[in-house]
Image (spheres, coloured by chain):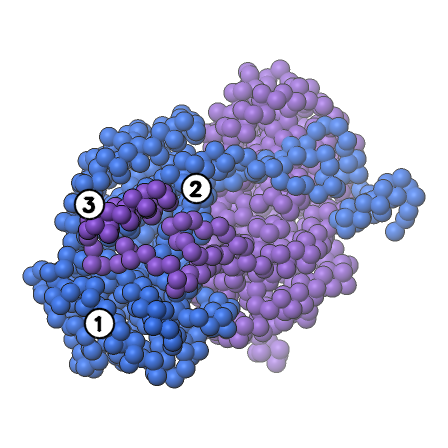
Chain colours: A blue, B purple
Amino acid sequence: MELVHVESLGKLRETFNSGKTKEASWRRSQLTGLLKFLQEREEDILMALKHDLGKHPVESYRDEVGTSIKSVNYALQNLKYWMSSKKVKVPIAAFPTRAELVPEPLGLVLIISSWNYPIGLSLEPLIGALAAGNTAVLKPSELAPQTSSLLAKSLPAYLDNKAVKIIEGDAIVGEQLLQHKWDKIFFTGSPRVGRIVMSAAAKHLTPVMLELGGKCPAVVDSLSSSWDREVAVKRILGGKFGACGGQACIGIDYILVEKNFAPTLVELLKNKVISMFGDNPKESHSIVRIVNKSHFLRLKKLLDDPQVKNSIVHGGSEDEENLYIEPTILVDPPLTAPIMTEEIFGPLLPIITLKKVEDSIGFIKSRPRALALYVFTNSETLKRRIIAETSSGSVTFNDAIIQYACDTLPFGGVGESGFGRYHGKFSFDAFSHEKAVTTRSFLVEIWFRFPPWNDHKLQLFRSAYRFDYLGLLLVALGLKRS
Amino acid sequence: MAEKELKKIFDSESACTLVSELRKTFNTGKTKSYEWRVSQLKNLQKLIEEHEKEIIEALQTDLAKPEAEIHVGEIGMLKSSLKTALNELRNWMMPEKVKTSMTTFPSSAEILPEPLGVTLVISAWNYPILLSIDPMIGAIAAGNAVVLKPSEVAPASSSFLAKYLGEYMDSSAIRVVEGAIPETTALLEQKWDKIFYTGNGRIGRIVMGAAAKHLTPVALELGGKCPVIVDSVINLQVATRRIIGGKWAFNNGQACVSADYIITTKEFAPKLIDSLKHEIETCFGTNPIESKDISRIINSNHFDRLSKLLDDEKVSGKIVCGGQRDKSCLRIAPTILLDVPEDSLIMNEEIFGPLLPILTVDKIEDSFDIVTSKEKPLAAYLFTNKNKLKDEFVRTISAGGTVINDISLHLAVHTLPFGGVGESGTGSYHGKFSFDAFSHKKAVLYRSFTGDASVRYPPYSNGKVRMLKALINGSILGIILALFKLSKD
């Protein structure tokens, strides 16, 4: 296994060094290839996602296929502009000097994606890597085996195999890959593995981008209009149970709500869960199942604590054989229980009640920064305070998850939720080096730049650095002294 | 006796306490205010203005740096950096509105910069004042608390910074920790929100490895062998002066972007060498080793390191200019070597000193292969008037930054990002890039409760797939058609 990697990685580097991948035509052909893959193999993709996760085609299309198509098209439309050199203004003191920023590919990059959005989280970074002119290795997650296999077997037909390789495998394969020198590593997954990735990258000074997770809170204000409540509740449930069954890095992890409004909210949520998923959600095919036994047992354990169990107000049933946990709502489980200290990544929705909704700010601040923060409110004051006083990868008001689809917003974390950002042009930038190119002419020399030094020259420098051009001129002409 | 007892060792516990204190300050929100940031930046201005004399003294003690170089390379750069930050800070702090598409309609969005928190700046010895304060300017402008660990290899500068930053800055948020390996290790064990390191690749790896334990993002400003490709179609005198300006008049070659080695054609080399010899004399006199207009070698370790490069048997006999050494005053004359073998020591490590090897090739285009066969440097330089060669250079050579027909000028242009790629580092700074380096750009999306597309939610159906396709593709016709079909489903 090890030898295969070394040889094939060498070939990828050779391809990069040939300069082929820098050409706009090559990049376009790869992006078009990705588009074709998504369009022609849509059925296979939807089937693989159904097999690996029990994902309904609507969810698959909405969150993975559709968004990837949108991203490829966006890249194709903007590629020329992204690739172009950008002129930069230069201070007069450096005249005559021309400066520009030239984006260039980094070289050979490694993309490690996760199992919950195995198509989206593989292709979205790949789009950036290819648009930026790199060669790439993609290692999809082995926990979504049919999707991994589909990518490894079918995607190569649409891409340049001398420049892009898909390598399947588990943690051992991952570790082997991490021993090599990459020009960038893009990792989506847990903080624990993120640390391993970054430590390995440090040995080669490889820059990394870590898309991690965290407990994404949803602050729900006391909404008065029934329409607002209806929409908010749909979006909250969509952002929890409708987002890979709660197994999403930007999924709503828990809710913060004022004590007074909590009963209303809980009722609305319970009713809506039933109307969205039916009386027997297991049969609804509208909710993703738990990805594997290990995660199932992890989630089961979260509910085992008697105090947690007692706080369940809806759901709670489990089916180990089918890896199914019913959409479960809890009210005020103990804050010290693992369900409130670890990222849930499953269909359990704790609701924490607070005296005042503004207390949510202190609550959020005292915890690690999340990838996303959601706030459902009409209060401009609350919005302003949340933005100013909390920190998170992103903040979305009155909706959830949908920020993922916005090409103009950077997608990424801060603190424990990771660093680096992508989507849209940010993906292109994530896999590029912006090289400064400064050109001077031989005419017009700042003669006082060179030794031997004397006070006169010193004085000229003083003026130059103060951007005091008149002073500069006067001293140069010998008309002014210090 | 009492003073010695009071001076505690700075260990893990001290570092932990330090970070907690600064975090407490940061959490009060004090450093986020525009007023605080401005006050601190202005304090830096005052510090530099009022203690210019001490800065010059410290740098002359540490490096015998000529006063003109201090003004240009350190004081001047800092003044300009502070001026830019103060002028632009309001703009930098403002949220950036961004367009949103049909997919999230109706919505509005913006990107909001916020400070990362408690940051660590580790600086180097060659520009000990500049490389300490310049990144701090970025950290402070972005609203962070910051700890500076200056290089112990430039002790006078380190003392200066500890004393005066202590006096002028808000010590509840800004601190200096002096020391060497033990102190740095203690600092690196802590959880920072960003680490900004300037130095070499070996320590860069250690810094990044330590940061990995806490998932701390890092900026590494490293170095490399910055090549200077010299074509024959140039203004020889101007080019020569600029090369000298980018080597011996540039902290005596002890700069991360100084000219490390030259590549030129076999034919042109003699002319270039003659010109260099002539201009070296003009700039530094007939006995350059004694010139006060050149910094000395920082210390005996580096002096020995550089001597070793010259003692390498592969390069003895290749010296065509200079070569004199004086260990007692830590000086080596401007030295040029011609045609050193590529496997010599001097061609396999960053020189960081007054030795300038010249490699020769048959055709100037061959020089690109030599450069690309090595690790990507922090800077690459080309002297030519041929446009085709310039284009080829930009297309082929990857480096942190490149300059055509000059050396290192780009770092004075604050609108250009200054940073490396590959072995020369990651991240960039100067101007707004400094602010960005210490900020998190938070994405904010505003949605309203009106305009809700029911197709998004369970229960799912095939009609919804069609509608979604249309919505995501932003196709109005598709949406209308899908709506019709949907109403039939």
Q: Earlier in the sequence, mark 2 or mark 3?
A: 3
Could one spot residue B57 in this view of the protein? no
Q: Position of residue A403 (x, y in %)?
A: 39, 56
Query: In which quadrant of the rendered view does residue A231 lie?
Result: bottom left
Query: Viewer-proximal residue, B424 or B88?
Result: B88
Distance from the alpha carbon under mark 2 to that under mark 1: 44 Å
Write the residue at 36% across / 39% down: A72
Q: Position of residue A409 (x, y in %)?
A: 44, 52
Q: Earlier in the sequence, mark 2 or mark 1?
A: 1
Query: Viewer-proximal residue, A277 or A171?
Result: A277
Distance from the alpha carbon under mark 3 to that under mark 1: 29 Å
Q: Position of residue B146 (x, y in %)?
A: 56, 65
Q: Mark 1 points at which residue?
A: A271
Query: In which quadrant of the rendered view does residue B3 lie?
Result: bottom right
Q: Mark 3 points at which residue?
A: A46
Q: Which amino acid does label 3 sit on?
A: Leu
Q: Mark 2 against mark 3, which lies toward the viewer? A: 3
Is disc 3 surrounded by few (<14), some (14 to 19) or many (20+) residues within 10 Å?
many
Q: Mark 2 against mark 1, which lies toward the viewer? A: 1
**Residue A428: mark in rendering:** 2
